[in-house]
């Protein structure tokens, strides 16, 4: 399923119904099921505003979520992985 990357407006509240949160949940499910050790979600405008929610969801599954900042500092990707 191809979900377009829609920018997250400044000050927006991220709800669990947002398509981007479903990508986070899918990544967590994939890792928890043993299908991958790490998943990086890339190219989502405004992903830095999603990071706190991703960290909570990952933590609840015994995983970690961290930002991978772009070289120019304009945004980030989110990597979800097992806690080392």
Image (cartoon, rainbow, N blue to C red):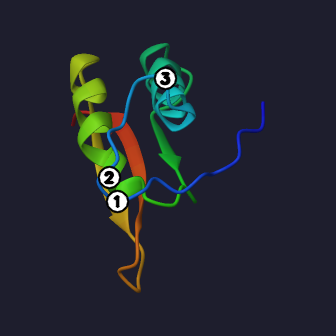
- Label 2: element kind: helix
Which residue is disc 3 drawn over? 17
- Label 3: element kind: loop
- Label 1: element kind: loop
Q: Is residue 34 above or below residue 77?
A: above
Residue placed furthest toward the bottom = 72
Side of 64 relative to 71 (left or right) = left
Q: Position of residue 53 (x, y in %)?
A: 28, 35
**Residue drawn 52% across and 26% down?**
22
Q: Earlier in the sequence, mark 1 or mark 2?
A: 1
Question: Of the numbered discs in the image, which one, if any, rests on residue 10?
Answer: 1
**Residue drawn 60% across and 52% down?**
6
Report how far apart the C-alphas of labels 3 and 1 lie in the structure: 18 Å
**Residue drawn 53% across and 57% down?**
7
* Closest to the observer, 10 or 38: 10
Other residues around mark 2 within 10 Å, as few (<14) / some (14–19) / many (≥20): some
- Which of pointers 1 and 2 indicates the residue nearer the eye? 1
């Amino acid at each position: 399923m191809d979900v377009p990357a829609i920018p997250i407006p400044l000050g927006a509240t991220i709800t669990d119904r947002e398509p981007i949160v479903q990508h986070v949940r899918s990544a967590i499910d994939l890792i928890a099921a043993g299908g991958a050790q790490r998943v990086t979600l890339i190219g989502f405008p405004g992903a830095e505003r999603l990071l706190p929610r991703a960290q909570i969801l990952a933590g609840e599954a015994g995983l970690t979520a961290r930002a991978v900042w772009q070289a120019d500092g304009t945004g980030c990707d989110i990597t979800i992985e097992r806690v080392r």
